[in-house]
Amino acid sequence: GAVVSQHPSWVICKSGTSVKIECRSLDFQATTMFWYRQFPKQSLMLMATSNEGSKATYEQGVEKDKFLINHASLTLSTLTVTSAHPEDSSFYICSALGDRGQDTQYFGPGTRLTVL
Amino acid sequence: DAKTTQPTSMDCAEGRAANLPCNHSTISGNEYVYWYRQIHSQGPQYIIHGLKNNETNEMASLIITEDRKSSTLILPHATLRDTAVYYCIASNFGNEKLTFGTGTRLTIIP
């Protein structure tokens, strides 16, 4: 149980385009989902927290108009990187907090974004 | 989240127990100790968590000192697949926000 998937697992796009990443909780309902970013040889950094049906809360320094988050259902959250630039190239990882006890975050496998 | 301190790297022989220490001297009374690991180019994997009692599951054991200022994650019989970066995180129940430090890079040696 407690499986989180992400799609796509990797994506390459041209500078200026937008990319959407999906995060799904497969076997549980996730009232809260989180988006992290990890640059090479660095640790994970929280970007934003999203709750189903409400606006996401962004960490300081993360542009909400650039990283659009939609938590439309209890099993799906999406992160859209708008007008992507090479500096947005990174490993994007989501996690989900389940509705059973809500004491543990389970992480997706990550999406590697490369912007050319 | 309280700050945690871990050794940068450790080696362990395959088949032996791997003991990973973590200091969290400023942990508050309602903060749990969570352990995750990240294998290269994958998302973090939940291992175990605890508040003050020792915990054991199919993956590992967690030993928390009585004063809760430090803990040790024990992988009882390390295999090559346990090579990863291990993160110790102190966070409130429900861990609404996980703050990842640099973790310990554990290398299992054949």
Image (spheres, coloured by chain):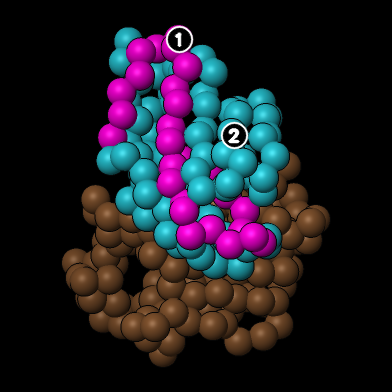
| Residue A109 in view | no
Position of B110 relative to A41 (above/below): above
Under circle 1, the secondary element is loop
Kindly indicate which chain is depicted in brown in the rendered structure: A
Position of B61 relative to A18 (above/below): above
User: What crowding class fits label 2: few (fewer than 14 Cα within 10 Å), some (14-19), or many (20 or more)?
Assistant: many
Q: Which residue carries the number 1 mark?
A: B15
Main SS, magenta residues = strand
Residue at x 43%, y 32% (from the top left corner): B20
Which amino acid type is shown beneath numbered disc 1?
A: Gly
Q: Residue furthest front?
A: B67
Query: Subunit of mark 2?
Result: B
Q: Residue furthest bottom?
A: A65
Verify CB contact (< 8 Å) between mark 1 and mark 2.
no
Instruction: For the C terminus of chain B, give its image quadrant.
Output: top left
Under circle 2, the secondary element is strand
Q: Chain B is which colour?
A: cyan
| Residue A89 in view | yes
Position of A33 with respect to B38 (left or right) is right
Query: Subunit of mark 1?
Result: B
Position of B63 with respect to B9 (left or right) is right
Q: Position of residue B108 (x, y in %)?
A: 35, 20
Which amino acid type is shown beneath numbered disc 2?
A: Leu
The disc placed on residue B62 is 2
* Residue A95 position by quadrant: bottom right
Earlier residue among tags 1 and 2: 1
State which region is magenta: B9-37
